[in-house]
Image: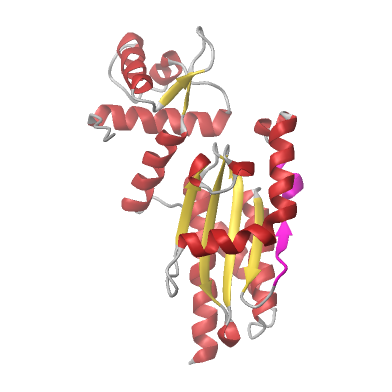
Amino acid sequence: MVILLTPRQVQLLNRVIEEYIATAEPVSSKTIESGGQFDVRSATIRNEMADMEDVGLLAQLHTSGGRVPTAKAYRLYVNSLIANEGLAVSHAMRRRVDEALQGIDHKDPETVNKTLARIIGELSGNLVMANMSEREDAYKVGLSNMLTFPEFREIDRVVGLTEFFDQFESMFERMHRSMWDQHDTDTKVMIGSESPYRQVHDETVIVSRYRLPKGHQGTLTLVGPMRMDYRKNLGLMTYAAQIANRITDTYRA
């Protein structure tokens, strides 16, 4: 089903998503009104939010509470960020990535790959796993970070995440084949049930693929709650791929 939104509804949906990302609390029409971005009353905002609930973009967890975005809403949001180049990597974060790569052996593909995973995991606060062609094991960081998110207070979410973490190597090849053409290098996003793995159907998975020295191919997989900072995380993953490709091209020239 194609969902057609008015410009005000698009702006409102984005505002709800960003408020929920920031607070992890259901968003009410009064919260939106108090932000001062919309020159309409709370009742009008509430009606617009109800319309978006009817088409599956928002969900109301409790009768008297605010609303939260659905996976469908996050997909529209991510598509818009990518189409409008709305990915945000601050100068400070780019510098942190660059500094992490200083002083390492840029000719060693495994060192480059692990270093990228370590710094992206640190900056994103999410689970990050690094794969490299012709290597069966993955380098994994950040599982403990995930357990600090409110989403993982439920034991079944923790079990699913740790199962995915433990079994990642055996599952990744199938995911890798389903996502890319042979020579494609890109950053891709799977939100909720878009992932082929039931263990992370409540999470978002971002995967970047890039070139590494000595003819290898590297992949970073970031897993976080669906309520993640997409601007920052997509920006970080895209920047990591760009840096890896640049390093590889330098030593291939």
Direction from residue 172 to residue 18 in the image, left or right: left
For this orientation, the residue located farthest to the bottom is 253
Of residues 72 and 78, the one nearer the viewer is 72
Q: Is residue 253 above or below residue 205?
A: below
Residue drawn 68% across the image and 49% down it: 164
Residue drawn 57% across the image and 79% down it: 212
Q: Position of residue 165 (x, y in %)?
A: 71, 51
Image quarter (top left, top right, bottom left or bottom right) of the N terminus: top left
Residue drawn 24% across the image and 32% down it: 4
Q: Quadrant of residue 57?
A: top left
Q: Which residues are magenta?
A: 136-146
Q: Is residue 118 above or below residue 133?
A: above
Residue drawn 36% across the image and 16% down it: 50
Direction from residue 167 to residue 248 in the image, left or right: left
Asked if residue 177 can be seen in this view, the reply is yes
Q: Position of residue 180 (x, y in %)?
A: 45, 65
Direction from residue 43 to residue 217 in the image, left or right: right
Asked if residue 145 can be seen in this view, the reply is no
Of residues 196 and 221, the one nearer the viewer is 196
Q: Quadrant of residue 153?
A: top right
| Colouring scheme, one of rainbow, by chain, secondary structure, one colour | secondary structure
Q: In this figure, what is the number of numbered marks?
A: 0
Q: Position of residue 157 (x, y in %)?
A: 68, 35
Q: Is residue 192 above or below residue 142?
A: above
Q: Quadrant of residue 13?
A: top left
Q: Position of residue 217 (x, y in %)?
A: 56, 76
> Does residue 58 belong to the magenta stretch?
no
